Image (cartoon, rainbow, N blue to C red):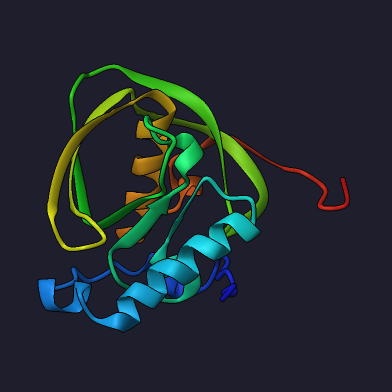
Amino acid sequence: MILDIFTEPNPILRQIGRDLTPAEVHDPKFSQLITDLTETMYDKDGVGIAAPQVGQSVKICVIAKDFTPEKTSDLILINPVWEKRTKARVSGEEGCLSVPHTYGKVRRYKKISVKALSENGTPIIFDANDFFARIIQHEVDHLNGILFIDKAKGLYQVDKKL
């Protein structure tokens, strides 16, 4: 089911999401949330989406398969955390479904290490680089109540009619 996207200044976007327990990960309602998040992300042409963007203050996000290294399946991250793998940061343009028509340059770490639970509750650890790392950092920020506009330089808006 396609869900409504919550937009700034909705207060849920500024809340720190709660971690899910292993039992919750196996609950059918969370499986449905993951399905709905994924459908919503593709419907809205997103590269990633986090649960707070659809009004759920829990730590789940989805990364679109076209932006994962294998490009074979969407990446579901539950309770994700990341650490920088290098001091190198790169500036890149970002936008967000929750801040429509607004873009800006955000400095993000080029290489990160990620720890999370998979869709089936299995612990996963992997490294992410470049644009893949940028998407993960953006989505994990959502889970911690941070929007890209909090970090962006040179914010600008694009007319929605274009």
The residue depicted at 55 percent of the width and 71 percent of the height is: 6
Q: Is residue 80 above or below residue 91?
A: below
Choose top left, top right, bottom left or bottom right for residue 82.
top left
Which x, y percent locates residue 102? Answer: 65, 47
Left or right: where does residue 43 sit relative to residue 19?
right
Question: For this view, does 18 lie left or right of residue 133?
Answer: left
Location of the N terminus (image quadrant): bottom right
Residue at the extreme right of the image, as rendered: 161
Pick out the residue farthest to the front: 72
Q: Is residue 71 left or right of residue 86?
A: right
Q: Is residue 146 above or below residue 73?
A: below
**Residue 141: image location, x then y, percent:** 35, 51
**Residue 87 at x, y = what percent?**
22, 19
Q: Residue at x 59, y 72 (%)?
A: 2
Q: How many marks?
A: 0
**Nearer to me, 4 or 39:** 39
**For residue 62, side relative to residue 25 (left or right):** right
Q: Residue at x 11, y 71 (%)?
A: 22
